[in-house]
Image (cartoon, rainbow, N blue to C red):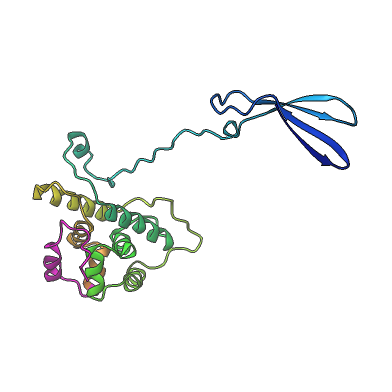
Amino acid sequence: MTSVSITLSALSVSLSTTEPPSLGNPSNSTPCSLSTSFLGRKLSVGVPHSNKLALKHPTAVATVLFSLPTGKPERISSGKSSQWSARAIKSFAMGELEARKLKYPNTGTEALLMGILVEGTSIAAKFLRANGITLFKVREETVKLLGKSDMYFFSPEHPPLTEPAQRALDWAVDQKLKSGDSGEITVTHLLLGIWSEKESAGHKILVSLGFDDEKAKELSVSMDKDYVPSYK
């Protein structure tokens, strides 16, 4: 048995343990006896093991869905669909955010275009910037074309897609399926999907900033790639 004597406020206190701590059984506490020379009494104190204080939480599992809204739900049930790349999904999410910033009720092709530029790391985004099409210019052209929303209007958390924007997404999926390639649907697919909607705001903004069919053809060469480290 070990005994340790300490002085607390001029009162001698003796703390002794009848056995060394056992780590083998976390359910038991180490018994010890506490006595004072002033009262001559002994108190039995149970000291819990430190691992008893640890809180145990169930492991959280995050699931990421590699898909975007589709106007052709039969694809999902038939299994004829491809996964979107992480950059394409982030571009879509940033597009929703841009629609909310402008207080628009829907996520249109113009918002998807801005989302591509906000994400910024894809081949499509770098190609746009290399041709002088920047986020600031697209946002400016969007306001010119569609106007400003009422200052008291608040967009929903996930502004629903406009019909042209949904068709742009479906066009991207269709092109990937036609290629027969097993890879992901990229940001370039998304951008060319926007370009395919001739009457959409996104297409008109691209035209106003100098994008044309020749540039679309040049970009389509890298359609199946989302990111190339050496690309400038």
Residue 118 x/y as whole percent: 34, 64
Residue 161 within the magenta-colored segment of the rendering: no
Looking at the image, residue 31 lies above or below residue 122: above
Measuring 32% from the left and 55% from the top, which residue is drawn there?
90
How far across and down, in percent of the image, does residue 219 sit? 15, 65
Q: Nearer the viewer, residue 132 or 71?
A: 132
Q: How many marks overall?
A: 0
Residue that extends furthest to the right in the rendered view of this protein: 38
Point out residue 159 in the picture as x, y percentages from the top left corner. 38, 52
Name above or below for residue 2 compared with residue 198: above
Question: Is 86 placed left or right of 215 in the picture?
Answer: right
Can you say which quadrant of the picture contains the C terminus? bottom left
Q: Nearer the viewer, residue 187 or 172?
A: 187
Q: Quadrant of the N terminus?
A: top right
Question: Where does residue 80 sit, x and y in percent of width and height?
Answer: 16, 39
Residue drawn at x 43%, y 37% is 60
Q: Is residue 220 magenta?
A: yes
- In the image shown, does 183 or 80 lie closer to the viewer? 183
Q: Which residues fall within the magenta stretch?
A: 208-232
State the residue in front, 153 or 21. 21
Quadrant of the rendered image containing residue 49: top right
Indicate the quadrant where residue 26 lies: top right
Secondary structure mainly formed by the magenta segment: loop
